[in-house]
Amino acid sequence: MTCEYNLYDPSWCPGCGNFMIRKALKQALEELEIPPHMAVVVTGIGQAAKMPHYIGTNGFNGLHGRALPPAIGIKLSNKELTVIAESGDGDTYGEGGNHFIHTIRRNVNIAHFVHDNQIYGLTKGQGSPTTAMGQVTTLQFDGVKIEPVKPLALSLTMGAGFVARGFSGDVPQLVELMKEAIQYKGYAHLDIFQPCVVWNKVNTFQWYKDRVYKLPEDYDYTDFNAAYEKSLEFGDKIPTGILYKVEKETYEDRFQFIKDGPPLVDAELNPMDAEKLLKDFY
Amino acid sequence: MNYSILIGGAAGQGMDTLAQLLTKSLKRYGYFVFKHSDYMSRVRGGHNFIQIRFSDRQVYTYEEKVDIIYALNQETIELHLGRLKKDGIVLADRALSDDEGLLLLELEETAKEAGNSRAMTSVGMGAIIRLLGLKPEEALKVIETTLKDSIVEVNKEAFSKGYEMVEPRFKVEQLEEGRILIDGNTAVALGAAAAGCRYYCGYPMTPSTTVLSNMEKWSQELGIFTEQVEDEIAALNMALGASYAGVRAMTGSSGGGIALMSEALSLAGIIETPIVIINVQRPGPATGLPTRTEQADLRFAIHSGHGEFPRMVISLRSAEDAFYQTARAFNLTEKYQIPVILLSDQYLADGEITVEPFDFSSIDIERNLHEGELPEGRYKRYLLTDTGISPRIIPGKIEGKVILLDSDEHDEYGNITESASVRKSMVDKRSKKGELLEGEIQEPWIIGEEQPDNLLVCWGSLFGPVKEAVQLLQEEGFSVGALAYGDIYPFPTKLLKKGASSAKKIIDIENNSMAQLDGLMREFALIKSDEKILKYDGRAFGVDELYNRLKEVVE
């Protein structure tokens, strides 16, 4: 079985962090030996969300803000598929904020890669939910006036069992984080810093490079309080790596017929199976 | 024969259980029963009433005039006394009135003697069964099998005491039985279960919630994944994910929730992924009248979702129709890869009715998934074909084949494109499916004469009241017939054109204020109605009310 992923010609701007994220994604899937027909990338709308057009996985490029609901529907219907939801910071934390919160509560076994460039790219440079206070954008002419979301702190406090941060400028680390997230049994949140070379002149490649540092070897990622503290570290130094990882029961395992049975998609459908329900109505 | 019983009181007085026991009992005595609940949108207090109508022939709706009123509070007497038929009876506890024209009994006192004042409604039920001249055995059996073990004995005792308190006032014969008693939402859920639906998610919204709760109830037994999700936006997007993965999926709501699904409905259109959506209508706009009924979302069902894409809209006419059409919807959505919208309403959804048991063996499951060889190379999810329908496969089943969907305009592979020529060919491809679908639509049901002088038209749940009204008018010698639309978009025109060619008068009957069906007739058949009988007070048509309004206009 071949586990090689084809790449197709993207329309991203030269120097875009998405190239490195795609490179890491290809390498992670290939090293995990997941054949392309068993992997699904589900996205919303935005530059990041074009991913399934540029790598040869199954792809569901849906609506803005709505990457997570179809990803859940797919995973619950066929638990044998590797399901990755992937989108930008605006898509995930803004338009799709409600789904983000409730997906964490469910803990479905999917990996969630958020391309976080702290700006809107596709719509040309407006502030995103992670744009810093005061930052001048193409729409917030005198600066952003609302607090940015803290994505990792948010997912931690909502009960996510896997919370991590990567950087498109460090592909080897990103590959490892993606592999960990995909292999984690449950909802895995990986926020990935990426520079937007055209629209974000503040959070540049150099800006990230100067600030990110890898969590030390002896960091205990099962310690919630330590993870929470790290999730709020967002100044001169910003930690990358796995902030938090613990075992949790998945949503699908709470359904006996999904846990112990064949994937729902393989069920033999027979109308007569439902006939017994009629007895309650005589 | 034809009798109606009205039970009225405040929420929390035990009316529901009483009505359930009484309805079930009357069904067991062999009658056709229709139970209609009139609820306010509140959990305690308010004025609620339930009407149970029964007959030796099929009944579809309630009557304005009733034979027995069982009043659990004074308000019921005040509000409904004027609706009593000649020789009708008002039954109430002695404490509620001193009007000697009423049948006042020591109901609560008797219940206490039987062991619990809460069993008062069973005393009343015993009295009603006796008033009707029926034997007590069937009703006692229903009490025994329906109530919790701990309260069966006291309620049986209360029933028997109530039974002894009165003498028969009516004489109704016991009939043969074997039918089921079911409401429209449950029939929809059964249809979905029969069709192999394995994914149903939704967000609670009256009056659609019981579709979700029924699916939830059967989830473990049948292996159907069900979930109360965060919002209706999630519901439809999630169901589309499930459908893409290859299971039969469905979602539903009432108007407000369906409005939130509009964007994802449009998504279903462009990604050509099968989905069944039920809209159990209630009066709008916005929150409207949450617990009441209306047929005002017909245009909304046809036009919601931005952009142009084919869809099918089926209005459900009765509990039986709800079962069979829901099952059919799953085949249509997979055959044409278009969204199929079912339209029900609160009156149909909550009204309980006796019908012949559903025939599960008549349900065919046709997946229309592509089987057999595929061409070498990348799979084209949107392969251009003569019919517009592309061979559909599901992910994870064929090595080397991946499936790409895109909400952007896309090429045959599903890749985003802005090519003018590809755009045009994809629009044409989707439109072709709509044209093909027109060959599939079912003409409306004909009630009464096919070429009458007075041609009535209606859609969805109005089938029942119209059918009864047509029967009454025919018995009086009027030349009358009706077309009751089920499939309503694409709009079937054959029978309408035929009927209209010889009718002296076309009368449109709808539960809305803008005569939306009349609009479709003008748009697609260039035919307009001469008279309109519209009702938009949030209530369904009673049979006598509809009959009276028709009498004013038929020739």
Image (cartoon, coloured by chain):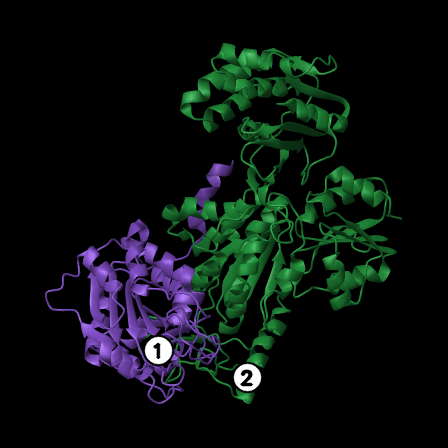
Chain colours: A purple, B green
- Rendered-image quadrant of the N terminus of chain A: bottom left
User: Disc 1 designates what residue?
Assistant: B401
Name the residue: 19% across, 74% down.
A213
Element at label 1: loop
Q: Quadrant of residue A65?
A: bottom left
The tally of labels here is: 2
> Which of these two is toward me, B210 or A43?
A43
Chain where mark 2 sits:
B
Q: Are marks 1 and 2 in contact (CB under 8 Å)?
A: no
Taking A154 as reference, is B369 above or below it? below
| Position of residue B420 measured from the top left corner of the image (x, y, whole percent) | 55, 88
Element at label 2: helix
Taking B61 as reference, is A51 above or below it? below
Select label 1 or label 2 by which is in front: 2
Q: Earlier in the sequence, mark 1 or mark 2?
A: 1
- Kindly identify the amino acid type of the residue bearing the numbered disc 2: Arg
Disc 1 packing (10 Å; few <14; some 14–19; many ≥20): many
| Position of residue B8 measured from the top left corner of the image (x, y, whole percent) | 63, 28
User: Disc 2 designates what residue?
Assistant: B423
| Position of residue B77 measured from the top left corner of the image (x, y, whole percent) | 70, 23
Q: Is residue B374 left or right of residue B469?
A: left
Name the residue: 64% across, 64% down.
B302
Answer yes or no: is residue B256 visible: yes
Q: Quadrant of residue B474?
A: top right
Chain where mark 1 sits:
B
Answer yes or no: is residue A265 visible: no
- Kindly identify the amino acid type of the residue bearing the numbered disc 1: Lys
